[in-house]
Amino acid sequence: MNYKNLKPFPKDFLWGASTSAYQVEGAWNEDGKGPSVIDMGRYPEGTSDFKVASDHYHRYKEDVALFAEMGLKAYRFSIAWTRIYPNGVGELNQKGIEFYNNLINELLSYNIEPIVTMYHFDLPYAIQQKGGWTNKETIDAFENYAKTLFEHFGDRVKYWLTINEQNMMILHGEAIGVVSSDIKNAQKELYQQNHHMLLAQAKAMKLCHKMCPDAMIGPAPNIASVYPASCNPEDVLAASNLSSIRNWLYLDAAVFGRYNSVAWSYMEEKGYTPIVYENDMDILKAGKPDFIAFNYYSTLTAAKYKDESQSDNSASDQQMEMSEPGVYQGVPNPYLQKTEFGWEMDPVGFRNTLREIYERYNLPLLVTENGLGAYDKLEEGEVINDDYRIDFLRKHIEQARLAITDGVNLIGYCPWSAIDLVSTHQGISKRYGFIYVNRDEFDLKDLRRIRKKSFYWYKDVIKSNGEKL
Ligand code: BG6
């Protein structure tokens, strides 16, 4: 629909920006922090590790002051489980509690709303050694961790996100670095882990409502509309298959407390179904989200599965197409351009994705990631002319406003990322931030902060409540 009049962004719209603990904090083994699976993982050749990252742990005050200068109304960050419980369970690390107390208080002193992700890829290594999410005990460990977060921060945090991109951890765990290659083909085990994460999430949501009745909590998967490669009914079915397996499996379980029927049949057909114990489905049903948070980078396109020779899942990551024998074949979309890192860009798909999710679940929506990874260049005079990022974000914000006019209840938009940070598997050179961090892959330089052109642009967007793009 082309509208003559667009609805404005809501008055209290959460204009924000996002990060995650392991990608921004550094201080990987300081003040009692235990190792996570990321700390103990392997890094792709030529990319830095996450030991120092953007050194936000030591510079959070300077960073928050910059966020305030940009006018952020909200800041979405994650808590490192291993700062709170170095071994995942057991002894609590007061220094970890102190750090997040300070960060939350600093944000609130500038009226920036903290939006907290409880777990963003960085499972405690001690838990991993006991079987990680394959072990049912991890559900209790997560519930205990959630309880601790609500106890200590629940008086000030009003927006909670349970698990970041659970769907990407299951589908692309190796690229992200949360699944080692030795269990690469053990799909059945992955879907068992998925089941346990769904239970852990449901328990955390229930607990949140009991302990923090004024707060809101929701899941934070990566959701993308899936287009059929053509109007061939077989292609349409393939797209629907992929959407059920990639999107609705996760959201149907979070919202309705049940497995998506197509996704379940897929798991049955492939022999991947998890063991579901007697009261598991009651637990799933008892946890209800107040909103749906989701990360959006691009859409996907699928065709009828043709043959093995055309399937190459080796380069796959969060946004790259995959294939599944007999189910769907991921294909490129000829209508879309790609980023320097090969991710298709689809602002209109953003509107479509917002509409699809809203129509399906009728819950408020919060965008917790959207952004452009690029090789930014620090030019003379301390400038970074990231016009391409402004262009990308502008187009997505335009589409968000159209979605609001379509009737979608969108409560906030938090692009990735507030500040430069280390990408999941492509190092610091793949930058997303509004604020440049002066370091290279291996040369930490002075880590000084420099406002990019997009910083000033986003500041105006927020100030005008999305009118001035
Ligand atoms: C999402 C993750 O998958 O995409 C972030 O939640 C990640 O942690 C972001 O950084 C961008 O992906 P990448 O691989 O470019 O860092």
Image: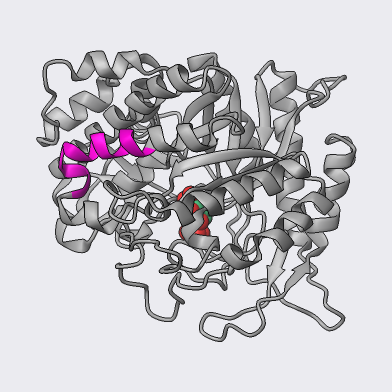
Residue at (65%, 36%) from the top-left corner?
348
**In terms of depth relative to the viewer, which is nearer, 352 or 85?**
85
Residue at (61%, 33%) from the top-left corner?
156
Tell me the quarter of the image containing the C terminus: top right
Percent of width and height locating residue 447? 65, 77
In the rendered structure, the answer to whether residue 189 lies left or right of residue 20 reads left
Percent of width and height locating residue 414? 65, 42
Classify 310 as above or below 154. Answer: below
Residue at (59%, 20%) from the top-left corner?
364
Magenta segment range?
Answer: 132-145
- Residue 264, visible in the rendered structure: yes
**In terms of depth relative to the viewer, which is nearer, 65 or 13?**
65
Snapshot colouring = one colour
Q: Main secondary structure of the magenta part?
A: helix
Q: What is the total number of numbered labels drawn onto the structure image?
A: 0
Residue at (27%, 58%) from the top-left corner?
125
